[in-house]
């Protein structure tokens, strides 16, 4: 395998988006009060609070799917949907704002969204439990 192989690039992308998103999921598992916060935002938009449990799928299950390369495209789609919910529920006021350091206020959220979409289009590559 050539070191500049696209499959290694796909692995790096999967480890980056899946691994970094997993930290957010682990934090939510450890601090269950954040689920109440998310449920409150959902009900504020007229959505059922039970949808808050979807954060565990979008920030724990799907990132693990991406990392190991099992149905990575589906995992990427789930993370992308999760990030769309996060952007609408918690960050709509940040779209036209810059941070104190000059970066876009939603750059981290957009990184996750766009990287997850890249996984949807690229798939897992060959270096995966079940390449797709």
Image (cartoon, helix red, strand yellow):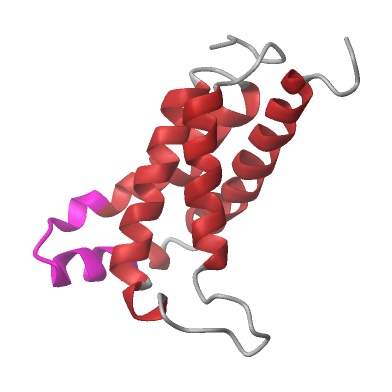
Instruction: Name which quarter of the figure residue 86 lies in.
Output: bottom left
Q: Residue 60 location, x and y as percent? A: 50, 41
Residue 33 to residue 23: above or below: below
Residue 132 to residue 38: above or below: above
Residue closest to the eye, 130 or 5: 5
Q: Residue 115 location, x and y as percent? A: 56, 44
Report whether 70 appears left or right of 58.
Answer: right
Report whether 33 appears left or right of 50.
Answer: right
Please name the residue shown 90% across and 14% down the image.
Answer: 2
**Dominant secondary structure (helix, strand or loop) of the stretch shown in magenta:** helix
Q: Is residue 39 magenta?
A: yes
Q: The N terminus appears in which quarter of the rendering?
A: top right
Report whether 117 appears left or right of 124.
Answer: left
Q: Residue 20 location, x and y as percent? A: 64, 49
Residue closest to the eye, 89 or 8: 8
Please name the residue shown 72% across and 15% down the image.
Answer: 127
Q: Which residues are magenta?
A: 37-51
> Can residue 103 be seen here?
yes
Q: Is residue 6 magenta?
A: no
> Can residue 36 be seen here?
no
Q: Residue 102 location, x and y as percent? A: 64, 84
């Amino acid at each position: 395998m050539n070191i500049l192989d696209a499959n290694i690039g796909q692995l790096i992308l999967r480890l980056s988006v899946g691994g970094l998103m997993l930290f957010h999921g682990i934090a939510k598992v450890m601090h269950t009060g954040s689920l109440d916060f998310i449920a409150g935002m959902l009900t504020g938009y007229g959505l059922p609070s039970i949808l808050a449990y979807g954060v565990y799928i979008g920030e724990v299950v799907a990132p693990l799917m991406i990392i190991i390369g099992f149905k990575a495209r589906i995992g990427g789609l789930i993370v992308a949907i999760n990030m769309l919910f996060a952007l609408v529920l918690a960050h709509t006021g940040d779209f036209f704002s810059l941070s104190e350091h000059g970066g876009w206020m939603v750059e981290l959220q957009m990184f996750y969204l766009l990287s997850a979409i890249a996984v949807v289009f690229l798939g897992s590559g060959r270096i995966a439990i079940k390449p797709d």
